[in-house]
């Protein structure tokens, strides 16, 4: 009911070509005011309803389809753009570019001004435009999935390969449609009732756009074509991120020249498209969740202010009250300043005392550390001195003991030498005496005496050797 009332209000705008953009907005807001008692629902479009809705545009080139989806969320600006195109259709492309720079439309709406047939169809079927925008705002992912389902269905029917002026490619199980010639976009005209083959849902038949006698379809050529649109304005700034199921945009300025979809989607400056309620211009959202997400967004109603002339006494009283209020405000400000100054001074004092205590603690710690280090160094010095004294004393004792032992050894050696000399002398004396007695005795006695002398000499030598040892 609410969408029907809004659509009637917007369609009534189209019948009055002399209305201004502000009057269009007023009529749309008046249509919305009739539906204030209507409560927005949380009902979302299912896949069959989305397929029914997207059937006439699902096979459009990706760049054009992104602009249609984005512009459908701003139906008032679509109406304004279509009326502007009708009014300025005889102008040159350069003149149109100059005039479009002054428009504050959403960039995708401005891009569609180069496609008057598409704009005219969106305005003629304004209910479809608003439903498409609501579905796109409700679930961007579901809308893109429905587009891919329709393209797969047309491919299975064998009609997608018959498209002449576009390039159909596949990207990770997704069908991509792009223009063959750079900076020239061809709009395909087709019968949505036949191009997809057998339609899977009888409850939701595809939306059909009747192009009249301008386009003819055949089984061998299911697509009709008009002259290509030469891009003369900012156009190549949006694209589908099919893997993520959302629309990606870059800065729309200076995008007249062709840019491939991969460049737009993978650019470091690309961002996901975000709806701007400002360009909605008061059109209500049909879904409660979408309305909460982007706000009620009703147009601002400016009320007229009536000035009353007061008497002199009343003016004096008012002036006096104003003076009192100013004085109170100034006093309040001064009190607040004084309080802030006191708080700041207290903080500074506390910080100063804390810093002083820290400095004192640091000095105390340094002095204690120095005293401890000096005591420790003195103790180490005393220990080393005592150790050196002990070493000297032990060295002296060892030297004295060594000298005594040497002296004792020398004395013993001298005694042994003297005793050995005496033994030798006594042996010599004995041997001389024996030799004399031997000469005086007979031969036998001499022999026996010689043997005795030998024995005595050998015994003496043994004793002397023992004494030497």
Image (cartoon, rainbow, N blue to C red):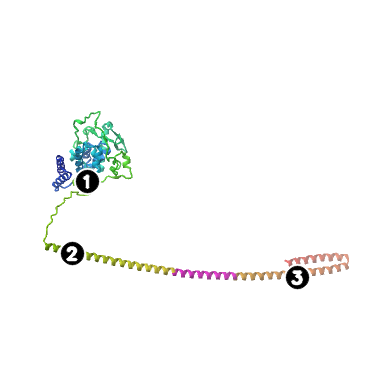
List the residue tagged with mark 1: 279
Q: Image height check: is 352 above or below 39?
A: below
Q: Which quadrant holds residue 187?
A: top left
Q: Position of residue 133 (x, y in %)?
A: 21, 42
For the residues labelled 3 and 2, the Cα–Cα distance comes to: 141 Å
Q: Position of residue 60 (x, y in %)?
A: 25, 36
| Residue located at (58% from left, 69% from top) | 391
Q: Is residue 196 visible?
A: no
Q: Position of residue 269 (x, y in %)?
A: 32, 45
- Please rate how many residues cluster around mark 2, counting C-alpha atoms within 10 Å: few if below 14, some from 14 to 19, many from 20: few
Which quadrant is the N terminus positioned in?
top left
Label placed on residue 323: 2
**For residue 24, side relative to residue 252 (left or right):** left
213 or 329: which is nearer to us?
329
Which quadrant is the C terminus positioned in?
bottom right
**The magenta segment:** 367-392
- Residue 381: in magenta span: yes
List the residue tagged with mark 3: 418
Q: Which quadrant holds residue 259?
A: top left
For the residues labelled 2 and 1, the Cα–Cα distance comes to: 45 Å
- Please rate how many residues cluster around mark 1, counting C-alpha atoms within 10 Å: few if below 14, some from 14 to 19, many from 20: some
Q: Image height check: is 377 above or below 20?
A: below
Element marked by disc 3: helix
Label placed on residue 225: none
Prevailing secondary structure class for the magenta stretch in the rendered image: helix
137 or 351: which is nearer to us?
351
- Please rate how many residues cluster around mark 3, counting C-alpha atoms within 10 Å: few if below 14, some from 14 to 19, many from 20: few
Disc on the earlier residue, 1 or 3: 1
Q: Nearer the viewer, mark 1 or mark 3?
A: 1
Dots 3, 2 in contact, CB < 8 A: no
């Amino acid at each position: 009911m609410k969408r029907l009332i809004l659509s009637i209000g917007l369609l009534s705008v189209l019948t009055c070509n002399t209305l201004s953009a502000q009057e269009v907005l007023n009529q749309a807001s008046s249509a919305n005011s009739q539906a204030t008692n209507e409560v927005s629902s949380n009902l979302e479009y299912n896949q069959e309803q989305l397929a029914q809705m997207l059937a006439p545009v699902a096979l459009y080139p990706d760049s054009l389809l992104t602009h249609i989806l984005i512009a459908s969320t701003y139906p008032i600006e679509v109406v304004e753009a279509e009326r502007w195109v009708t009014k300025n259709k005889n102008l040159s492309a350069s003149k149109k570019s100059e005039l479009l720079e002054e428009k504050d439309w959403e960039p995708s709406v401005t891009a569609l001004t180069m496609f008057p047939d598409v704009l005219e169809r969106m305005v003629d079927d304004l209910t479809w435009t608003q439903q498409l925008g609501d579905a796109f705002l409700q679930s961007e992912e579901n809308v893109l999935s429905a587009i891919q389902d329709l393209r797969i269905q047309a491919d299975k029917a064998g009609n997608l390969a018959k498209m002449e002026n576009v390039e159909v490619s596949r990207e990770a199980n997704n069908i991509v449609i792009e223009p063959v010639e750079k900076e020239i976009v061809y709009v395909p005209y087709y019968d949505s009732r036949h191009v997809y083959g057998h339609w899977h849902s009888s409850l939701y038949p595809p939306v059909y756009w009747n192009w009249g006698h301008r386009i003819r379809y055949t089984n061998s050529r299911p697509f009709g074509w008009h002259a290509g649109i030469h891009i003369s304005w900012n156009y190549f700034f949006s694209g589908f991120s099919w893997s993520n199921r959302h629309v990606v945009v870059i800065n729309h300025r200076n995008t007249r020249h062709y840019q491939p979809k991969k460049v737009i989607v993978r650019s470091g400056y690309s961002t996901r498209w975000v709806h701007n309620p400002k360009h909605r211009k008061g059109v209500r959202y049909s879904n409660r969740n979408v309305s909460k997400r982007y706000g009620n967004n009703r147009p601002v109603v400016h009320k007229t202010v009536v000035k009353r002339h007061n008497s002199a006494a009343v003016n004096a009283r008012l002036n006096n009250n104003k003076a009192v209020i100013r004085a109170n405000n100034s006093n309040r400000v001064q009190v607040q300043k004084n309080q802030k100054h006191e708080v700041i001074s207290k903080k500074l004092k506390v910080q100063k005392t804390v810093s002083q205590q820290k400095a004192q603690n640091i000095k105390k710690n340094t002095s204690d550390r120095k005293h401890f280090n000096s005591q420790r160094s003195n103790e180490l010095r005393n220990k080393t001195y005592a150790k050196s004294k002990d070493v000297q004393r032990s060295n002296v004792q060892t030297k004295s003991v060594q000298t005594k032992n040497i002296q004792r050894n020398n004395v013993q050696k001298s005694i042994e030498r003297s005793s050995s000399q005496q033994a030798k002398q006594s042996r010599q004396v004995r041997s001389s005496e024996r030799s004399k007695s031997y000469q005086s005795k007979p031969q036998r006695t001499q022999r026996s005496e010689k043997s005795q002398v030998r024995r005595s000499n050998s015994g003496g030598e043994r004793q002397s050797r023992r004494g030497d040892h």
